[in-house]
Image (cartoon, rainbow, N blue to C red):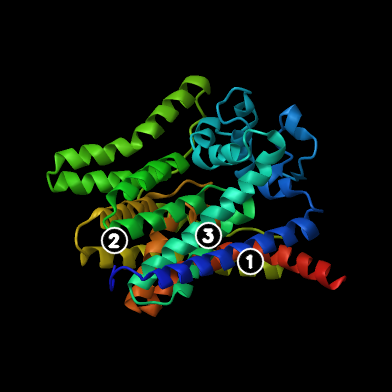
Amino acid sequence: MSELGAPAPASQRACAAVALLCLLVVFGWTELRVHYVFGGNWTAIFYNGTAFTQPPDLEAGTYRIEGPGYDGQFYRLLAHDPFLAKGYYRYADSAQLRFRRLLIPLTAWLLAFGKQAWIDGAFVAVEMIFLGLGVYWCARILVRAGRSPAWGLLFVILPATMASFDRMLVDGPLAALFAGYLLYCAEERWGRVWVIAMLAALTRDTGLLLGVGLALERLLRRDWRRAAWFSLSALPTIAWYAYVFARIPPDRPVAILAFPVWGWVRRLLWLRPYPDAVTQLILRVTDVLAVLGLAISVFVAIRWLTKSRLGPVTLCVALFAVLALVLGGREHMIDAFGFGRPVSPLLLWVMLEAASRRTWSALAPPLLVSLSVSLVFARPMIEVAHGLTGR
């Protein structure tokens, strides 16, 4: 990524101001949505579905959404039982998969001092903190390239970010850590990079790719000592995985990967049904645009990577490009809300590179994926508007 050197303290303060303003706006939107859409019940944004039972001590006061709900409900369970002592994994689907993703639930538990009544609120706070960090780190990256700190707001419209503050997921925090990884690799602050790689691995399985990129780059340069040091960033995750595997029964097999590009083709050939004709047309158009946007983003990333100097960032981005190519599980390819989240680090890198290079046309493909994800805000925005206007 092009750069003009480290930002001055005044620029860092400007980056922090942009991040803080963004955090306050997103939190304000979330408060309005909870108030006008969910009757003031903050547990609603975890999307606890009626298809799953709740632990008896969490049932009272939990807002239930008709159907299966969404992944945030399972991370909420882990936040209330981070050491698997209460057996809350019995209330989750694919419990091993969900409960491997420890960092955000554990951070919420620590922030709440383990008090059950505070944990849900602490979880929301952790999500907002990581959103602010993501904006701050992206702003810092783009200031290094001579751009305004306001360009850090690109982080907010990333699919993983929007999905995470909408439904309390772990993908947005991982994308934020990836932004920190990009910044501190550029600044060659390897101690911070090591910590971020360690935290990313604990956040979500795909976070392990950050450490792999670091270790692989050192191995290619035959720097065995530093390759071993970077590899140790995965040690806490390996220990936690072993603990989870020892206490939680194996999950049923889940098809996540497919032959390269086949998942994209299958998604383009399948049309989502919807009872309303206008909504169905919008969904079908945005579904196609999202898949095309992902495909073009991968093509742009590969083209830029082949012209870039070998380093941990280029290797890590290449690994996410490979993930995008083979992501093909039917559950992940239903819509951009599903497939846009795991590949968001790739999309973020393309957007940051496009802004740094002033190659504005390259912003369009990732934004097509974001456009499809943003449709989930349409109905809440209407309900909030009605609430504010008294209609």
Is residue 336 at least partly visible in the picture?
no
What residue sits 38% from the left and 72% below the top? Answer: 143
Along the horizontal axis of the image, is 212 left or right of 307?
A: right
Does residue 166 appear anywhere in the picture? yes
- Quadrant that contains the C terminus: bottom right
Q: Is residue 328 above or below residue 366?
A: above
Tag 1 or tag 2, which sits nearer the N-term? Answer: 1
Identify residue for label 1: 25
Numbered label attached to residue 186: 2
Q: Where does label 3 land, which residue?
A: 132
In the image, residue 15 above or below residue 312: below
Q: CA distance from mark 2 to mark 1?
A: 29 Å
Q: Against 170, is 188 above or below? A: below
The disc, 2 or 3, on the residue closer to the chain's N-terminal end is 3
Q: Residue furthest right?
A: 391
Residue 91, position as x, y percentages in the image: 65, 30
The span from disc 1 to disc 3 (Cα, nearest Å) is 11 Å
What amino acid does circle 3 point to? Gly
**Which secondary structure, mark 2?**
helix
| Residue 58 as seen in the image, left or right of residue 252 | right
